[in-house]
């Protein structure tokens, strides 16, 4: 106990506890700055600059390579120190006693010049674009709304995610590049682990297949596979044509082109349960019975599957919230997936936890 200014007794332990909580509260309130510093590092091209440098880069070296004025030296150092504390870069002290920054496995994913693996930078730039960040300001208003169909995204922009993508070519481009970067990453992993779900499939339609990155990787990995990308007309119209891939524009709620198998990569988490059942029914109509190889292949999260750390548990929760902010969808656990499959008339399913936080779910008619 210590005496307070007015002579009253104060428990020192309580004060320390309160001060600790106060610091943690400040940290939570400002954590969005971490995300914005990550965005800034990608926009400044810091990961590529360090990679090209071939060794840890000092702040003076980074300033020169990135054409940043000398006067911003201290500011850049603080940004790099914050990102290094988060594990995105690694801080070293060189033999001459200078602080230098190196890549880590995380920032290596952001480079566009290291190896064959597609860069995750376009996906990060998409996630942190103002169109996706601004709706977060609407959350408390959104929770009080009776209307369950309006999303925070619609409250911020006056239209749905897909309508905005259809209206604004630059947003459409940013989104499609982000998704193509993710598809490149996922297909790299799928083909490295053997891609057994795709083996033996002769014809496949990639529903909501975007710019065709997934389809192109599948056609290359599985010779003899004929692939069709099916997406909204404005997406298909602007997609670069890819060898061995056919493009068809349309609406998956109306009709899905026929094939042995339908792929739904990162589609169903965008939609409500009712909409998912409608999409899955259209997919079931497009494929032959199970005995003739018919199946739907879903690449999406199964909440609770593939999580090996507190960070991955938190990442799945963040994705669930992101779907709530942008769309009427959600991330589902196995029980929630099973209900969708039963309601849309499928007989059986198999989950393979294959791609980090995401799984491959094969669903059979
Ligand atoms: C989250 S993205 C996934 C893209 C791609 N499958 C991937 O993982 O990279 C969702 C896709 O669904 C498409 N989409 C949205 N509504 C659709 C509809 N009614 N019919 C067909 N495609 C649709 C979007 O244009 C977009 O390309």
Image: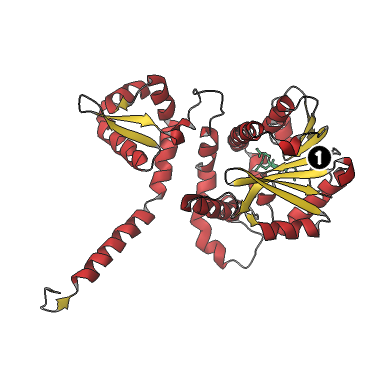
Q: Residue pushed farthest bottom?
A: 8
The foreground one among 327 and 219 is 219
Rendered location of residue 81, percent (x, y):
31, 38
Q: Crowding near pointer 1: few (<14 within 10 Å), some, many (20+)?
A: many
Which quadrant of the structure image shows residue 325?
bottom right
The foreground one among 264 and 95 is 95
The foreground one among 174 and 14 is 14
Rendered location of residue 94, percent (x, y):
25, 26
Image side of residue 120 versus residue 47, left or right: right
Which quadrant of the structure image shows residue 122?
top right
Question: Which quadrant of the picture is home to ligand 1?
Answer: top right
> Would you place residue 45 above or below residue 280 in this image?
above
The answer to whether one can see residue 274 in this image is no
Q: Residue at x 33, y 38 (%)?
A: 79
Q: Is mark 1 within 8 Å of ligand 1?
A: no
Q: Residue at x 44, y 25 (%)?
A: 48
The foreground one among 149 and 301 is 301
Q: Secondary structure at mark 1?
A: strand
The answer to whether one can see residue 165 in this image is yes
How many discs mark residues in the rendered view? 1
Q: State the quadrant of the N terminus.
A: bottom left
Q: Residue at x 48, y 28 (%)?
A: 111
Rendered location of residue 44, percent (x, y):
41, 30
> Would you place residue 205 above or below residue 151 in this image?
above
Q: How is the image coloured?
A: secondary structure
Task: Give the residue pinned by disc 1.
Answer: 261
> Would you place residue 325 above or below residue 239 in this image?
below
Rendered location of residue 276, percent (x, y):
74, 53
């Amino acid at each position: 106990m210590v005496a307070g200014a007015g002579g009253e007794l104060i428990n020192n332990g309580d004060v320390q506890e309160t001060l600790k909580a106060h610091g943690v509260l400040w940290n939570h309130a400002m954590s969005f700055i971490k995300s914005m510093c990550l965005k800034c590092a990608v926009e400044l091209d810091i990961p590529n600059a360090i990679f090209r440098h071939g060794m840890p880069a000092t702040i003076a070296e980074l300033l020169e390579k990135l054409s940043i004025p000398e006067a911003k030296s201290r500011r850049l150092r603080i940004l790099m120190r914050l990102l290094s504390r988060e594990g995105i870069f690694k801080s070293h002290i060189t033999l001459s006693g200078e602080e230098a920054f190196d890549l880590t496995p995380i920032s290596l994913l952001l480079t566009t010049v290291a190896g064959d693996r597609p860069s995750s930078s376009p996906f990060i730039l998409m996630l942190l674009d103002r169109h996706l960040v601004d709706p977060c300001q609407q959350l408390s208003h959104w929770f009080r709304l009776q209307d369950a169909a309006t999303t925070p995204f619609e409250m911020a922009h006056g239209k749905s995610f897909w309508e905005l993508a259809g209206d604004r070519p630059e947003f459409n481009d940013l989104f499609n590049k982000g998704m193509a970067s993710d598809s490149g990453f996922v297909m790299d992993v799928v083909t490295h682990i053997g891609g057994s779900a795709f083996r033996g499939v002769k014809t496949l339609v990639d529903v909501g297949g975007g710019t065709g990155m997934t389809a192109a990787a599948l056609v290359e990995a599985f010779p003899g596979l004929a692939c069709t990308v099916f997406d909204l007309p404005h997406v298909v119209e602007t997609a670069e044509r890819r060898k061995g891939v056919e493009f068809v524009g349309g609406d998956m709620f109306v009709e899905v082109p026929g094939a042995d198998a339908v792929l739904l990569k990162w589609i169903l988490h965008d939609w409500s349960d009712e909409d998912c059942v409608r999409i899955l029914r259209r997919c079931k109509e497009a494929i032959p019975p199970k005995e003739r190889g018919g199946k739907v292949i879903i690449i999406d999260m199964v909440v609770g599957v593939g999580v090996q750390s507190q960070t991955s548990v938190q990442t799945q929760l963040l994705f669930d919230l992101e779907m709530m902010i942008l769309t009427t969808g959600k991330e589902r656990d196995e029980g929630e997936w099973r209900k969708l499959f039963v309601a849309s008339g499928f007989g059986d399913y198999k989950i393979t936890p294959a791609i980090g936080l995401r799984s491959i779910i094969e669903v059979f008619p």
